[in-house]
Each structure stands twice: as C-alpha cells, then as structure tokens.
Amino acid sequence: MTIPQSFIQELLARADVVDIVGRYVPLKKAGANFMGLCPFHGEKSPSFSVSPTKQFYHCFGCGKNGNAIGFLMDHGGMSFLEAVDDLAQQYGLQVPQDDLSPQEKARAAEQRQRQLSLSDVLEKAGESYRKHLKVSPKAVAYLKGRGLSGEIAKRFGLGYAPEGWRSLASVFPEYDSPLLAECGLVIVNEEDAKRYDRFRDRIMFPIRNVKGECIGFGGRVLGDEKPKYLNSPETPVFSKGRELYGLFEARTALREQGYALVTEGYMDVVALAQLGFPNAVATLGTACTTEHVHKLFRFTDSVVFSFDGDSAGRRAARKALDGALPYATDTRTVKFLFLPAEHDPDSFIREYGAEAFSRHVAEALPLSRFLIEAAREQCDLGTAEGRAHMAANARPLWSALPEGVLKRQLLSELAELAQLPAADLAALWQQAAATSPGRTGQRAAPGADEAPDWHSGQHGHGAPHAGGWQDGGPPRQGGHGPGGGPGGGFKRFEKGSFKGGEGGFKGKGGDRDNWRGGKWGQKPEENDDGPRTPPVTRADHAARLLLSHMGALDHLTHEDHQMLCELPPPHGALFVWLESQYHEHGPVAWAVLRESLRQQPFDALATRLMTGSHAQTEGEIKELRAELRGVLNRMLVDRLKQLENEAIAAARSDPLALQRYRELQDRRKTLEKELLSASVE
C-alpha cells in the first residue's frame, strides 16, 4: 500500500512528538526542549532531548533521532505502515488508500473494525480474569509458590479463569455472540451448538502485540492435568507464528540489557522477569520462525535462544537456527544457550544464582559454531563420504545467510572441513543452487503432448539420458532403477511397455501416436502417477503449490521470483500479488486468501487451480517444497532455452552474445542432468 507524502506531512503536523514520546519516557522541561533518560540505551544522566518546535527527538548519548513516526518504529518495534496507522488512529485520521478499489477499501475498513471489536472483547475478558485472581486463594498460592510477586503479576496482567463451564456468561450478557467464539474465548460444540468457556481453572497470561493490545491468552493448569498449557487458537488478531509472549513488556529492557533472551514458555518469561532478567520473551507453542527473529531485531541487535539440553531442546534450537540465518548480518549476534537437561532457566537461576546464569548467557554457542555443528552432525569427517555429506548439509544453511564477512568466513571454515579450496566449494554450491531434485519417488513428466523417446535416449524436451536406457546401462549404486529393486541395474525396456516397481505404470502400445496427455493410451484425468491430476501447465502447478503453502515463497531464489513475476497474465500478476500478500501478512491459509482474491483479475485462475481433487496437496512439507523445486527447475529450463535463442539472434550485432549463449547452454544442461537424475530415483 502506497501512502501519499502529503498525508504523512499532514499527520506529522498534527502529531505532537512531545506527547507521543512522553507516553513512554518521563520528560522534564529544560529551556526550549524537554529532556529525559534515553529509552534506547541505559544511562543515569538524561541526554535524550525532544524539541516541540522542530518536532524532533535526539539522544546525545547513542545518536538515535527522528520524528513521531520514527519513534513508534524504533521504540514500539512497528513497521512503517503500522506506525502511520497507529498515529493516524490517535489523531482521528483515516489513512488514504488511493490504490485500492472501493470494494477493497470497504473490506479493509470492515476488517479493521472487526479486529478492534475482537480486541475489545479480549481486553474485557482479561479484566475479568484479573479480578478473579484477586479473590482466588488457590491461584494466588500457586503464583506465590512459583516465586512470583504481586508486582510481577500486575506487570504482566496475570489472571485466573474460574472452574465453571460458562463463567464468561457473567461478563458478556450476550454469551451467544459470534465474537466470543471468533476470538477463541468460547468453544461451540459442533453437534449440539452448546457453548462453553475455553479456559477453565487456569492461570491466565494475556498475550499482547507490540502496541500493548490484548490479542489472545495462554492458560496454565494449577496442577499436573493435561494439557498443561493451552493457547488461544488462530484468530484474525492472533497468529502464533508471528507473536512473541512478553515482547511488549520487555521492549525497554531489550535495549537496556542489550539482548533478547528467547525461552520456551510464558512461565519462563514471567519467572525470569522476577529473577532479574526482564528481557526474556517466548514463542507460543510453536517453533521459532523468521518472522519472530525479524520482530526481535527491531528492538535489539543481539538474540540468545535458551533451550533445554535434551534432544527435544536440540531440535527446537535447530529450527531456531533456520529462522535466524536470513537475519544474521555482520552487525548482529545470535547465540544458542543449552542448559542441563534437568533445568529450565527458572530452576537453574534458583539453584546456581543469577550471576551463573549470566555467565552461561555470555558463553553461549555463537550461530557460526552451531551452524557447523549442525552440518557435521553424524558425519565422519575422516572419510571422503563423510566430508561430502557435511558439505551437503551445510549448503542450505550457508546459503540462507545474508552476504557479508560472516558468510565468507564460514565458507572458508566449511571448505577446510571438506578439504576443498573455498572457491571450488562455492562453485559447486552455486551450481547446485537451482538444481534441487523434485519429490522423491516421482518421475519427471514429459511435455503434456510429447511422448518420451525411450530408445533414442531422449526424454521430454530432448534432454539426453546419460548413456540412454535402451541398452540397460550400468548398475546404480543404492536406490532403485526404473524397473529394478534396491541396488539393481536398469532393465531393458520392452517395446510398448514401461514397467516400474510397485505403483509404476504400463503403457498400452509403443507408438508415439498413442501418447495422450502424459499417459500411453489413457486420458490425462486417469493418470495414476500420484494422488491428484496434474494442472494443465507448469505455471498452474507452481501457482497451486504456492497458494496451498505460501511459506514456500521463503525458499525461492531471486531468479525464481523474477521468472514467476514476469510470466504473462494472469499468472505473472497472480505471483506478484501473492508475494505482496506474503510480505504484508505472512503465510496464510487458502481460505483466507480466497476472500482477499475477490474482484482481482486473476480470481478465476486461482479458484480453478484450487478447486477439485488436484488441489489436495498431500505429503510432507519437505516433499511439497521439493515438488515445487522440480516444477520451477523445469520452467527455468524452458526459460533458458528462450534466452539461448535470443542470444543467438543477437550474435550478429553483439560480440558478447555467443559467450552469453554458451553460459546459458551450460546452465541448462546442468539443470537437465539434475532433472534426469531425479526422474530415475
């Protein structure tokens, strides 16, 4: 969304930076300006100046400066659009949306009003929970037993949900209001439509966004009942993959302490705040995502992940590593702290003290060391095979790092472990970057109307098989040949038939005229190569996978993005729109996308792709991403062929065109070999 500069100027003219900053920082008049302790770094003498005449703030200690919008971004961790929207609401202004249609504007306004209504309901419930805590001796006793003071409970807004099945009915007279179910406070029985409270007999932890608005709850039982922890479901205002518990409460401490401490539960966050570590936050029952890390780096340049030392903690740390890699620039620090298996941060500090815990934090494992540990895990570096395995493990991790000194240093270290020159390792990885194999167990499909020429060693668009399949070929080491068992060689193909292992296919006749839409003598919809009918084109196939799993956009290369967005309408426009939705809202389900697609020029295309049996994307996420990679690689081959033709045509007038042609041809051949290799595995 583009906001006119004229509106930004009007908004800043109406806003008072002294008023905005003063809500978070105690200010005192000092001549023409106001002074206070800087909220961006720890100091004992005020050096933070706010000018009412210039509508500007500046810290003479750390150099932070800006206007009212900049303060909300720097201090509140908001994006530019969030800061503008928040400031506009405070001053009763409506952010213009000139690039939206009237229908889109109406939907956006309706969505905002709906979100405000849900937040109001959640705030009212939170107030009720806090009142119940004050009159519940057993809930108070539980918190005291965990070492929590009343001050900490107040700071985090802790409450208590009583035991009754419909306690909220006394808070909301309209207990059958759909808002209660929509924000996750009430569960509606699907069989008899009866309603009851989601949270009962639990300590309640309100979950706030960076603006301090209540967007959900976490509830913990007082005993050992299961489930021990219960979170609000996904709602229009709450997404576990985007929010961090305690971030709003910790925003000032993050800057004062100089780092964020990411733990595994909201009880850890509250307990750590009680014990002198107010800079702790926690994920909400989900693995740490790139969005979590991005949000943290709005407040600090250093993040320490704290995990238990057991196998589950190691797995969680590995996922956090994946989330942190894209943001591990040369000016940021990411570390991993592993406590003894019998301890969490709370119990460790109570047994060994805060100083011992601080030492462990300072000595935590840097991201660079953990990356190498993850890459070499279960690899015998004393053998060539083990070193090759390590290098294969390291490639996706290293590739996710942003360009910089850290990335180059790690390349040198990994190359040394692999016993290769760094330049050779980089060249191998660059060559492999765009040639990841397709889904395991799937053969590469020929063109929709093109029969594979098994006997000439050609497949699909003329890509050669290594040595051809006509004469059987050499035995393969490990894996399955097209017609053999483990470790078997290629079988000679009989004319008119292709026999694979269990689940393969048999042709009906051997002449090319009998090839129809991907099967010998069969209609396309009868294809038994998988659980669904393939879309008509590869662009369709890629669009369906991305509409089903938006998160896969994170795994595309720049070349992939460019290729998809440059496709002719309606596909190219759909991919452009899909990327904009992902960057603004993160990965969302098809049902949510469907509503946003209405009135878009590519609505019919997306609806067609996501309707019918072929739209059911079955399999593990890893397999679906591999399937997408295979489709994109085939599209890249087609694109490279087109660029080769253009280079040949330009060779008459451009002396460099032939060199460009050879580079494109080499790249295409490498891709084709990789695709063929994947097709026979």
Image (cartoon, helix red, strand yellow):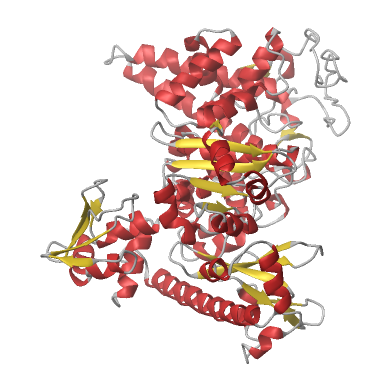
Quadrant housing residue 202 = bottom right
Please tell me whether residue 625 is drawn above or below residue 416 in the rendered image: below
Q: Position of residue 502 (x, y in %)?
A: 89, 31
- Whether residue 467 sits left or right of residue 364 in the image: it is right
**Quadrant, the C terminus:** top right
Question: Relative to the observer, which residue lies in front, 614 or 395?
Answer: 395
Q: Position of residue 504 (x, y in %)?
A: 84, 31
- Whether residue 538 sits left or right of residue 29 in the image: it is right
Instruction: Residue at 66% x, 29% y: name it.
Output: 446
Q: Position of residue 48 (x, y in %)?
A: 24, 55
- Whether residue 90 sits left or right of residue 278 in the image: it is left
Q: Position of residue 156 (x, y in %)?
A: 54, 67
**Quadrant, the N terminus:** bottom left
Quadrant housing residue 390 = top right
Please tell me whether residue 463 is drawn above or below residue 554 in the rendered image: above
Question: Relative to the observer, which residue lies in front, 448 or 500?
Answer: 500
Residue 465 visible? The answer is no
Please tell me whether residue 367 is drawn above or below residue 165 in the rendered image: above
Residue 106 visible? The answer is yes
Residue found farthest to the bottom: 173
Instruction: Residue at 35% x, 50% y: name it.
Output: 42
Quadrant housing residue 89 = bottom left
Please tell me whether residue 369 is drawn above or below residue 198 in the rendered image: above
Total numbered badges shown on the rendered structure: 0
